[in-house]
Image (spheres, grey):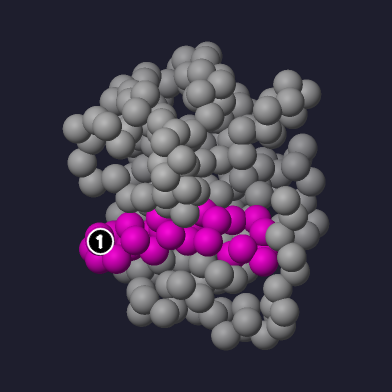
Amino acid sequence: MRMRHKKNLDSRLAEVSEYLITLRSESLNFNDAKNERHIIDLEKIFGNSNPVYLEIGGGKGQFACTFAQQNPDVNMLCVEKISDVIVLACEKAKEMGLKNVKFVSCSAEYLESFMPEHSFEAIFLNFSCPFPKKSYASHRLTHERFLNIYKPLLKENAPICQKTDNMHFFEFSIEQFSKCGYEISNVSLDLHNSDFEGNIVTEYESRFVSQGMPIYRLEARAK
């Protein structure tokens, strides 16, 4: 279901501008994004050299803000391409008084144009859209074209942490990780009935768990 356009979106975004990173993406094309280099300075943006974590598809910011609150000595960078959603995440961060989280309105295809290589301690993919139609498989955030974008952004042995409620998407992801030379570990087929500690429950996750649906989780590291 398409989200209704937020009232006063521009003014609301202006009020949380300290949480937003503006990128020069309007002239880029997905196919040649790699050739356009507008690398951002993470130390300048956060005002420190603390470790940086990246979430892609952060939605309303529940995970990013909770992670930032629980880990005040690290930085969280959250990517979300829909402005009507990202404004809610920024407002949440402002309400919580967080200083170590920033949001980027950007599609994942552009990450290699803006993000410095070997910069992230982990990438989080929480309940990404599964795009169930086979013809849309290349849009899935664990498709090989995206996994090859993420690989140079991660520090050595840094994981991609995926959570989803969709079994078929999870199986697809495992195939893609293996195909792209990632080593998979810490696989859970029912996260909330496992011994995994430290899980941060997202908005979608709370809904799925209340419906009795299992949550699938894995970690994947480039070999």
Report if residue 63 lies within the magenta region: yes
- The magenta stretch spans which residues? 58-86
Q: Which residue occupies the foreground of this view, 62 or 190?
A: 190
Rendered view: 67 above or below 57: below
How packed mark 1 is, by other alpha carbons closer than 10 Å (few <14, some 14-19, many 20 or more), is: few
Quarter of the figure with residue 46: bottom left
Q: Which residue is mark 1?
A: 70
Q: Tell me the residue at 57%/61% (across/down).
A: 104
- At a point 79% along the width and 46% down the height, the residue shown is 29
- Above or below 13: residue 164: above
Rendered position, 106 above or below 154: below
Q: Quadrant of residue 144?
A: top right
Image side of residue 134 versus residue 124, left or right: right
Q: Residue at x 51, y 37 (%)?
A: 150
Residue 64: in sight, yes or no?
A: yes
Name the residue located 56 percent from the left edge and 79 percent from the top edge.
Answer: 17
The x, y position of residue 156, in whole percent, is 33, 34
> Which residue is at the front of the view, 183 or 199?
199
Residue 73 location in percent, x, y? 23, 63
Name the one closer to the observer, 186 or 114.
186
Q: Is residue 42 left or right of residue 191?
A: right
Amino acid marked by disc 1? Gln
**Residue 53 to residue 134: above or below:** below
**In the rendered image, is residue 162 in sight?**
no
Q: Position of residue 155 (x, y in %)?
A: 36, 39
